[in-house]
Image: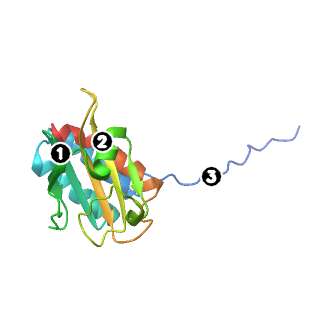
Amino acid sequence: MPIKEPPVRKRAAPRKTARRDPKCRALQEIGALIVAGGRGPEVVEEIAELVQRTCKYRWVGVYKISRHDFVIEAATNKMRPACPRFPITQGLSAKAMESRRTVMVPDVKKEPCFLPNFWSTKSEIVVPIIDDEHDRVLGVINVESAKRNAFDKTDRDFLEGVARLTWRALR
């Protein structure tokens, strides 16, 4: 009787691991900050800087809702926005807050409710930060680019992951 050889196994394509994927690594770092008890403006600033470095975004801002306004909690690149405080009823941030969904705008010139932080902004993505324990919006992550169509599904997914972790630092 002939000896049967074992079937040849094909090698699976290498998986993206946290070591290789900078976005996954950034989410792990943010999670570690939060698990370690990180809270307050310094931690939110650190998160914004990490997000900006990871994706090479031009500007990342985190706005916290305070009374009836969005108030800047953190901003990257030492760039402070033209509107460090504005009513929660205005702009793309209000749209994201009301819908509780991410707002991606490929061309801000075509968006009537766009409030410019920087006049050179061509596209923007705004992600609501939702407190899971109390089911309320605490603020938004606002990322702006000087290029049109700068954001895609991978940016949205990453920033939504950041928002799911960041709410704990905003409380």
Q: Which marked residue is nearer to the observer: mark 3 or mark 2?
A: 2
Residue for badge 1: 64
Residue type, label 3:
Arg
Q: Secondary structure at mark 2?
A: helix
Residue drawn at x 43%, y 51% as measured from the top left: 17
Q: Position of residue 2 (x, y in %)?
A: 87, 41
Position of the C terminus, as image quadrant, is top left
In the rendered structure, the answer to whether residue 41 lies left or right of residue 133 reads left
Q: Residues within 10 Å of mark 2 (few under 14, many from 20)?
A: many
Residue for badge 2: 97
In the rendered structure, the answer to whether residue 84 lies left or right of residue 59 reads left
> Closer to the camera, 11 or 95?
95
Counting residues from the N terminus, which is met first, the one under dot 3 or under dot 1? Answer: 3
Residue drawn at x 27%, y 59% as measured from the top left: 115
Q: Secondary structure at mark 3?
A: loop
Q: Is residue 67 above or below residue 51?
A: above
Question: Does residue 100 appear anywhere in the picture?
Answer: no
Q: Position of residue 157 (x, y in %)?
A: 42, 48
- Measured Cα–Cα span from mark 1 to mark 2: 11 Å
Q: Secondary structure at mark 1?
A: strand
Residue for badge 3: 11
Counting residues from the N terminus, which is met first, the one under dot 3 or under dot 2? Answer: 3
> Closer to the camera, 10 or 79?
79
Q: Position of residue 152 (x, y in %)?
A: 46, 58
Q: Which marked residue is nearer to the observer: mark 1 or mark 2?
A: 2
> Closer to the camera, 100 or 116?
116
Q: Position of residue 19 (x, y in %)?
A: 37, 55
